[in-house]
């Protein structure tokens, strides 16, 4: 992977599988994989951990079982795909890793845009927010991924960037706080409109 591109799902799964394996040997994972129906040897595990295997959903499920068995710790699909940052889904779509994890947790994929690839690209390029956006998302009762997608839909840019633009250059913390509350109110109104079917 070059430093200019986001990792693929295969690369993220590989990194996470290696991290979850911990001190266990590759051979142990290969053996556990065979017990759950994967025809894997240690070379295949190595290939997976290096992002050279694009696993299907059945393979991911079996890998969760194999890693759980080998490490004696529960491993979920979210554990395998979790990534903090932009993820390259395919050659046209990039999204924030939290959106992918949220989707596997059963969160609705509420992305209403005519230009999904532009939205995902903007989300990946501008990963503004951090703690501020996490707190704002919690206060609205939505996931981080949904929060970011809603901000992009409403303003065409991340929450923190919109806050800073409206507050103006050199704004103090109090002014940025007032603007952030106004933005959250706009988001709350949009969310309530959707719940009431006003789209």
Image: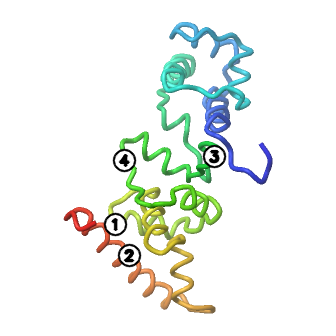
SS class, disc 3: strand
Q: Which callout, 1 or 3, points at the residue further toward the start of the chain?
A: 3
CB atoms of marks 2 and 4 within 8 Å: no
Q: CA distance from mark 2 to mark 4?
A: 20 Å
The reply, left or right, for residue 117 in relation to residue 177 is right
Residue at 67% from the left image edge and 30% from the top image edge: 18
Q: CA distance from mark 1 to mark 3?
A: 28 Å
Q: Is the residue 159 above or below the residue 23 in the image?
A: below
CB atoms of marks 2 and 1 within 8 Å: yes
Q: Which of label 4 and label 3 is nearer to you? A: 3
Q: Which callout, 2 or 4, points at the residue further toward the start of the chain?
A: 4
Q: Which residue is mark 4?
A: 107
SS class, disc 1: helix
Q: Which callout, 2 or 3, points at the residue further toward the start of the chain?
A: 3
Badge 3: how crowded within 10 Å, few (<14), some, or many (20+)? many
Q: Which residue is mark 3?
A: 88
Q: Position of residue 79 (x, y in %)?
A: 52, 36
Q: CA distance from mark 2 to mark 1?
A: 8 Å
Q: Which callout, 4 or 3, points at the residue further toward the start of the chain?
A: 3
Q: CA distance from mark 4 to mark 3?
A: 20 Å
Q: CA distance from mark 1 to mark 4?
A: 15 Å
User: In front: 124, or 118?
Assistant: 118
Badge 1: how crowded within 10 Å, few (<14), some, or many (20+)? some
The reply, left or right, for residue 190 in relation to residue 6 is left
CB atoms of marks 1 and 3 within 8 Å: no
Q: Is the residue 88 above or below the residue 131 in the image?
A: above
User: In front: 164, or 109?
Assistant: 109
Q: Position of residue 78 (x, y in %)?
A: 49, 38
The quadrant of the rendering that contains the C terminus is: bottom left
Q: Which mark is residue 184?
A: 2
User: In front: 37, or 95?
Assistant: 95
């Amino acid at each position: 992977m070059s430093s200019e591109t986001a990792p693929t799902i295969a690369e993220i799964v590989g990194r996470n599988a290696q991290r979850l394996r911990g001190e266990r040997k590759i051979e142990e994972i290969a053996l556990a994989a065979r017990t759950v129906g994967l025809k894997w040897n240690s070379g295949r595990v190595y290939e997976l951990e290096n992002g050279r295997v694009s696993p299907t959903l059945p393979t991911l499920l079996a890998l969760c079982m194999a890693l759980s068995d080998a490490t004696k710790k529960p491993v979920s699909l979210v554990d395998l795909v979790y990534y903090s940052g932009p993820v390259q889904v395919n050659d046209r779509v990039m999204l924030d890793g939290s959106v992918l994890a949220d989707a596997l947790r059963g969160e609705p994929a509420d992305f209403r845009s005519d230009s999904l690839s532009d939205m995902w690209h903007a989300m990946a390029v501008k990963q503004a927010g951090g703690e501020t956006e996490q707190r704002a998302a919690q206060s609205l009762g939505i996931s981080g991924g949904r929060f970011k997608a809603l901000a992009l839909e409403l303003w065409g840019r991340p929450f923190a960037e919109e806050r800073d633009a409206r507050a103006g250059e050199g704004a103090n913390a109090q002014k940025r706080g007032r603007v952030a509350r106004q933005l959250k109110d706009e988001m709350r109104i949009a969310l309530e409109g959707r719940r009431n079917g006003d789209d």
